[in-house]
Image: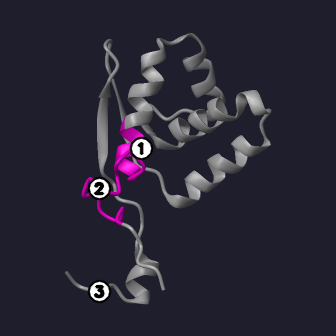
Amino acid sequence: MATLDKAALLARKRTDRTDEVDLGDGTVTVRGLTRGEITRARAAASRADKADQVTTLDNHFIAAGLVEPEMTVAEVAEWLESAPAGDSVAVLTAIQQLSGLAEGAQKSGVSGARKRSRR
């Protein structure tokens, strides 16, 4: 495997890989998140009340990762408030897998998820 130089690293963008998530009555399409999207979602969650931080983070992840249909954070919150609990789990799991954030990603062979060597 070739070593990437600085120019190649700076040119890297998120992949356009998507996944369809079956919600029973139909599907939604999701993609993986960029590091910037994850950072912004975490910042929004840190500003939320302690009791709402996980929900805020989830809503931001889903809003950023939804390709079809596109939804705002407020729309995601409205949807998930009355939707079956499994909807958010299924959608978040797919987004996390595409982002390399799924549990076990360090061992799964997900590209870019290996441990860094210490210097």
Q: For this rendering, which residue is in front, 38 or 70? A: 38
Q: Is label 1 or label 2 in front? A: 2
Q: For this view, does 71 lie left or right of residue 8?
A: right
In this picture, is 92 found above or below 77? below
Residue 9 sits in quarter: bottom left
Q: For this view, does 24 lie left or right of residue 50?
A: left
Q: Residue at x 29, y 56 (%)?
A: 107
Kindly identify which residue carries mark 2: 107
**Label 1 SS:** helix
Q: Which residues are magenta?
A: 94-114
Q: Residue at x 47, y 25 (%)?
A: 88
Q: Residue at x 70, y 35 (%)?
A: 53
Where is residue 94 shown, x and y percent of the image? 36, 37
Kindly identify which residue carries mark 1: 96
CA distance for labels 2 and 3: 21 Å
In this picture, is 54 found above or below 42? above
Q: Is label 2 or label 3 in front? A: 2
Q: Residue at x 29, y 33 (%)?
A: 20
For the residue carrying disc 3, how many other residues have a C-alpha within 10 Å: few (<14), some (14-19), or many (20+)?
few
In this picture, is 89 found above or below 114? above
